Image (tube, rainbow, N blue to C red):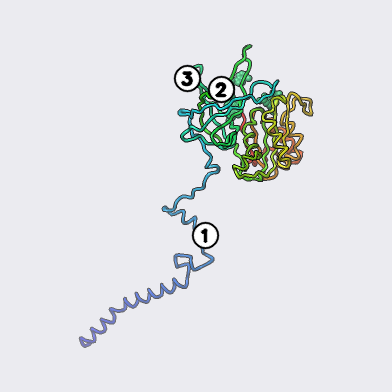
Amino acid sequence: MAYSEARVLAGGLAHIPILVGVFWFIQSVLLRRLDPKKQGNTASDPTQRKTPAAEKTADSSSPKAKPKTKKPAHADVPVNTYKPKQPFVGSVIENYSLLKEGGIGRVNHITFDLSKGNPQLKYVEGQSIGIIPDGLDAKGKPHKIRLYSIASTRHGDNFAGNTVSLCVRQLQYEQDGETVNGVCSTFLCDIKPGEKIKITGPVGKEMLLPEDEESNVVMLATGTGIAPMRAYMRKMFEPKEREKNGWNYRGKAWLFMGAPKTENLLYDSDFEHYQKEFPDNLRYTKAISREQKNAKGGRMYIQDRVLEHAKELFELIENPKTHIYLCGLKGMEPGIDEALTSAASSKGLNWSELRSQLRKAGRWHVETY
Ligand code: FAD
Ligand code: A2P
């Protein structure tokens, strides 16, 4: 073989790996185009395309993606603006008895000025505030706070948005032949307009009203348990409140109120008035324990009234727009449960299951003390 022939042959052989490489490259590109599974993404195959939700999930798993933040319910409700170590110091505007002549004990409506607060103590219907009574306890330490349900709406009784009102029963009991007066409730019932008052809070999200203007609101109150209900009633039926909130309540509200005597019915004339003005939206049922008798001849309690109206109440409870509020004496809870258990069983329902469903749905609200 001549030298030049040998060079041509060697040069041709040297191109073989290059040709094999080019061929392999073209084949793999063509195959990828034809077979989506080998493409490394699913965009061209609609059956493989991720749903927007799945894409979101995939996106959010990337370390750069922000975690999904769902705003918790009632996140805008103010809580603990003032704490026990640094309470707000307000002053008393008014303090008057809610009882008629001959009523049992002392129950007062007390209003405090909040206007000088910085920040101002704001609250919504259904919350409570803490009160630190003046003076020292038996150990010489400042008294601890006591909680009281707020009886006014966020606009206050004067609609100026800078007051808060409470409904307080003086605690009194007999011990070793002597009358003992509760520290804070006596302090509050005795406090005079112009005097200073240490306030904490607001607290509580258990007793808030639903936002739906068409919700149904069943209220079961004993004694001062009427406090949050008075705020609800004003929000629902007081013309100025309706105007201020632009909230035109159109649901069914039903207040069951327990008091020992007619003279002890709290805010009764306001509620009677609302019932007259809104007969299609408000029912008001009273259980006057020491004047009326239940079916068994005993004291008439609100649970007896609940039993009397069980059928209508259950129709309301079965409606998902209905919320039930219980407030007042702790002792009323078993009685209400018993009444609702027997009312439910006559409809073939299990009350404890139903109650836990209501609670999970945020429709069963209890504040007893
Ligand atoms: P204290 O001096 O603290 O005396 C209470 C203590 O006296 C009890 O702990 C107990 O040891 C003892 N005692 C009580 N009764 C007896 C008795 N019969 N025999 C023997 N010992 C007894 N109250 C209202 O008036 N209106 C409200 O709107 C209101 N809302 C509340 C909301 C919440 C969320 C809570 C938790 C409580 C509410 N209370 C309300 C109750 C309030 O907080 C006080 O507990 C109440 O005013 C009594 O406080 P006091 O300082 O007067 O009594
Ligand atoms: P009574 O005291 O006649 O037994 P107040 O706080 O103004 O005293 O009102 C509380 C009302 O609740 C009273 O009518 C009282 O009746 C009533 N009551 C007392 N115990 C219970 C209970 N276990 N269940 C329901 N109502 C009760």
The CA span between labels 3 and 2 is: 24 Å
Looking at the rendered image, the disc whose residue lies closer to the viewer, 2 or 1, is 2
User: Which sits earlier in the primary sequence, circle 2 or circle 1?
Assistant: 1
Badge 3 vs badge 2, beta-carbon distance below 8 Å: no
Mark seen at residue 65: none
User: Which sits earlier in the primary sequence, circle 3 or circle 2?
Assistant: 3
The CA span between labels 2 and 1 is: 64 Å
Three-letter residue code for mark 1: Pro
The CA span between labels 1 and 3 is: 61 Å
| Residue at mark 3: C-beta within 8 A of ligand 1 | no
Mark seen at residue 192: 2
Residue 12's spot in the image, x, y percent?
Answer: 28, 82
Image position of 258 (left or right of 149): right
Circle 1: element type: helix
Image position of 167 (left or right of 44): right
Q: Quadrant of residue 301?
A: top right
- Residue 107 higher or lower than 354, as above or below: above
Q: Foreground residue, 195 or 166?
A: 195
Judge the density around disc 2: few (<14), some (14-19), many (≥20) Cα neighbours within 10 Å.
some
| The quarter of the picture showing ligand 1 | top right
Judge the density around disc 1: few (<14), some (14-19), many (≥20) Cα neighbours within 10 Å.
few
Could one spot residue 26 in this view of the protein? yes
Residue 72's spot in the image, x, y percent?
Answer: 53, 44
Image position of 49 (left or right of 171): left
Residue lying furthest bottom in this view?
2
Q: Quadrant of the N terminus?
A: bottom left
Q: Mark 1 = which residue?
A: 52
Three-letter residue code for mark 3: Lys
Mark seen at residue 141: 3
Residue lying furthest top in this view?
177
Circle 2: element type: loop
Q: Foreground residue, 283 or 93?
A: 93
